């Protein structure tokens, strides 16, 4: 999978996971919502692992690297 495509899928899974987490803050007994949260969490973790295996760590918590400085900044692509 291409880097940008993988980042988009990763971002989508993370967004869905966070939204379900916010929902669960007020609906903690909703089993279906918890099931969806776990699904998106698993999906996010799998995509993150795939990305980091192919392109390096997403955060400094993954590794102490300055590789992110080598990538183009968002305004460089305009």
Image (cartoon, grey):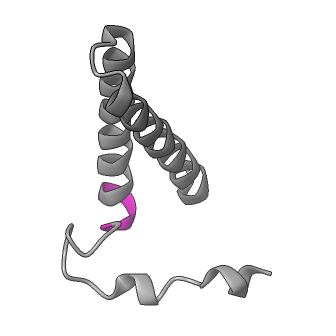
What is the quadrant of residue 21 in the picture? top left
Q: Main secondary structure of the magenta part?
A: helix
Q: Residue at x 28, y 22 (%)?
A: 28
Nearest the viewer among 30 and 74 is 30
In the rendered image, the vertical position of residue 74 relative to residue 50, given as above or below: below
Nearest the viewer among 16 and 58 is 16
- Residue 6 placed where, x, y %? 52, 49
Nearest the viewer among 38 and 68 is 38
- The stretch of residues the image draws in magenta is 53-57
In the rendered image, the vertical position of residue 14 relative to residue 66, given as above or below: above
- Give the farthest residue toward the right: 78
- Residue 46 placed where, x, y %? 32, 39
- Residue 42 placed where, x, y %? 30, 31
Is residue 64 rendered magenta in the image?
Answer: no
What is the quadrant of residue 27 in the picture? top left
Nearest the viewer among 25 and 78 is 25
Is residue 54 rendered magenta in the image?
Answer: yes
In the rendered image, the vertical position of residue 26 relative to residue 78, given as above or below: above
Q: Residue at x 30, y 56 (%)?
A: 53
Q: How many marks?
A: 0
């Amino acid at each position: 999978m291409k880097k940008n495509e993988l980042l988009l899928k990763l971002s989508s899974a993370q967004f869905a996971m966070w939204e379900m987490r916010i929902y669960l803050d007020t609906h903690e007994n909703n089993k279906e919502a918890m099931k969806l949260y776990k699904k998106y969490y698993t999906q996010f973790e799998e995509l993150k692992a795939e990305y980091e295996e192919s392109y390096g760590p997403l955060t400094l918590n993954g590794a102490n690297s300055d590789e992110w400085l080598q990538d183009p900044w968002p305004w460089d692509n305009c």
